[in-house]
Amino acid sequence: MQPPRWRRSTRSFSICGVSAAIRWSAGARIRSCFSIGSHYGFHHIDSFGTGGYDYIVGDVTIHLARLMEHAERNQILFSEFIRHRKDGEPPVNTAAFLEYASEKSRGLDGVKFGADEIDTVKTYLTGPERTDGDFPVRRLKIVDKHGLEHFAYNAKVNFFLRNRDPIYLGLQDQYLPPKFFLG
């Protein structure tokens, strides 16, 4: 029997180390969780050398699994992360990453979407409405089956079309269950 082979997953790092987990639930509703972090591709060869299995393992996959266990139907969660960059620029956190992604989504303006075109896409982290009408981002806490705490942010993606009603993805903060709220 050959020992398992470990190799760093180059494919995941070619897309900035973004990992996503999407789980279908009853009624064709999805739960989406995203994170950035290190993980490895593990290729296990069977004892006859005729085949094997590929696994992705690492901290980021553990965070995603824990978030998926607690995500609500139609919810989009972004794990809390800080990613240090090689070029000496400031590190990127969850909010900065989503802001960058939101800026890039402007490239979708005018793209054909079915029989219509995308007018604009709005992507943002949610939070409760304050009396002044502002919506500060809310940090969510998820306690897993081992009693470990994982932090995340709820997100929304809104597609505004030129000639049709908007498409809203994700849950608004007001519809989140209290299990996510910090003390």
Image: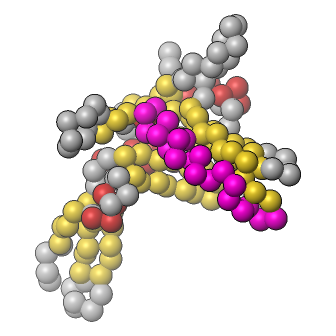
Q: Can residue 61 be seen in this view?
A: no
Residue at the image point whose x is 68% and y is 8% from the top? 132
Q: Residue furthest top?
A: 131
Verify whether residue 47 appears in magenta: no
Question: Where 51 sits versus 79, above or below?
Answer: below
The secondary structure that dominates the magenta segment is helix
Apparent side of residue 67 relative to residue 5 in the rendered image (left or right): right
Q: Can residue 156 be seen at all in this image of the molecule?
A: yes
The image position of residue 143, as x and y in percent, is 45, 32
In the image, residue 18 sits, relative to residue 168, either above or below, namely: below
- Residue 107, image x, y percentages: 58, 51
Q: Which of 150 and 104 is in front in this view?
A: 104
Residue 123, percent from left and from top: 60, 39
Quadrant in the picture for residue 11: bottom left
| Residue 29 screen position, x and y as percent | 70, 54
Determine whether, in the image, residue 101 is placed left or right of residue 155.
left
**Which region is colored magenta?**
95-115
Residue 100 within the magenta-colored segment of the rendering: yes
Kindly indicate the quadrant of the structure image that contains residue 2.
bottom left
User: Residue visible at 51% across and 28% down?
Assistant: 140
